[in-house]
Amino acid sequence: MHPEPSLSENELSPQAIEFVLRMGRAFHRHGFSAARVEEVMVRLAERLGLPLAQIFSTPTSIMAAFGPLGTQSSHLLRVEPGSMNLAQVSQLDRLAIDVVQGEVAPVGGIARLRAIEDHPEVYGPLASIGAFVTASGTVSVFLGGGRKELVAASVIGFATGLLALYAARRPRLQRVFEPLVALMASVIAGVVARLWLPHSVYVSTLAGLIVLIPGFSLTVAVRELSTQHLASGTARFASATATFLGIGFGVALGGRLVAIALGERADVAALAFPLWVLPIAVALAGLAFAGSLRSPPDASARACWASSSAPSWARSRSESSATSFPACATDHPSSSWCRASSCWCRAP
């Protein structure tokens, strides 16, 4: 038998290792699942001549080793999940493809990666706050609210947007952001209903907090569990559960404080908008959520079209097909384009 060829750590390119680690951290920051982060890093390592790459990704760390077992070069990154930025994800995907195809060297890739991370946001503060307001207001319409619920939910969305901008550069505040916003939303909804505009507190509060629901994290957690990435999936699922509990605690505490200060009050039934308003509201909601994910303008337009198609399609087809048709009509061309352009980082 021939002994396994050895490769000393000094023979591994430091620039290639740095690029692979930086790319893994960048994709991890934007919410990619453990399986996808590992796939990206392994593909890049193979292309850059880093043999026998072994990657282990969790929601708070990335461990990577390169080379044969006896002479492995091991690395550890302490990372924390960030917020989704679809504009940067698109640029990272393009960079990864260029490196895999040999068009960009590791040194040039590191420079491009730094430029991507340092690039200003696609939308400014006013647009970000507008996305919060629009998402909250339109979701209240989708939940069966009327004009009063729309106004109250928009006020909550405006306050949430302001607090999100304030907490963006304050790590300590970010740790309690969801419970704090839930408390604030519950108080605003209760005070507005009692002192100014009687409305359905339930609808306005839920619509105002819709942007905080960790649906993406929960979806990624289920995906990881189903693909046997148990450590990452369990941790991410526990994190999403803790976020739900924090939101529930904040809403309950805020409602109780308002009841103590202003007295108990029965909830008012919402008077829903006419049916023709629903397609407009859902279209604007799709645009707002795309903006909150910092999606490029062209992708935001596609999200708006797909969202607005569902209610219109529902009027002439079964309810189950109302979302499937626009989703398929948008997803199939997008998937075909990804395959044609060698987009192998397409799904978190």
Image (cartoon, rainbow, N blue to C red):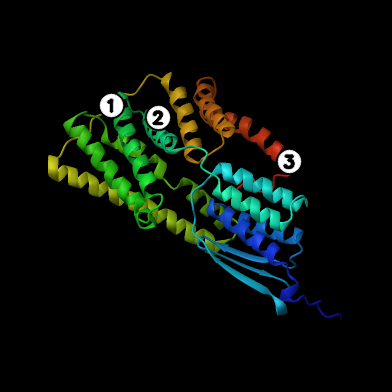
Identify the residue at image location x=61%, y=59%: 22
Q: Nearer the viewer, residue 191 or 75?
A: 75
Which residue was labeled with disc 2? 138
Residue 53 vertical position relative to residue 169 in the rendered view, above or below: below
First in sequence: mark 3 vs mark 1:
1
- Characterize the local packing of mark 1: few (<14), some (14-19) or many (20 or more) Cα atoms within 10 angstroms: many
Q: CA distance from mark 2 to mark 3?
A: 35 Å
Q: Tag 1's secondary structure? A: helix
First in sequence: mark 2 vs mark 3:
2
Which residue was labeled with disc 3? 341
Identify the residue at image location x=54%, y=38%: 295
Q: Amino acid at mark 1?
A: Lys
Q: Provide residue 290's location: percent of width, then percent of height.
A: 51, 36
Identify the residue at image location x=52%, y=59%: 233
Q: Amino acid at mark 3?
A: Ser
Which residue was labeled with disc 1? 148
Residue 86: image quadrant is top right
Quadrant that contains the N terminus: bottom right
Q: Tag 3's secondary structure? A: loop
Is residue 307 visible in the rendered structure shown here? yes
Observer-side mark, 2 or 3, equals 3
Q: Provide residue 218's location: percent of width, then percent of height.
A: 48, 50
Q: Are marks 3 and 1 in contact (CB under 8 Å)?
A: no
Q: Provide residue 317's location: percent of width, then percent of height.
A: 55, 23
Q: Nearer the viewer, residue 28 or 23?
A: 23
Q: Tag 2's secondary structure? A: helix
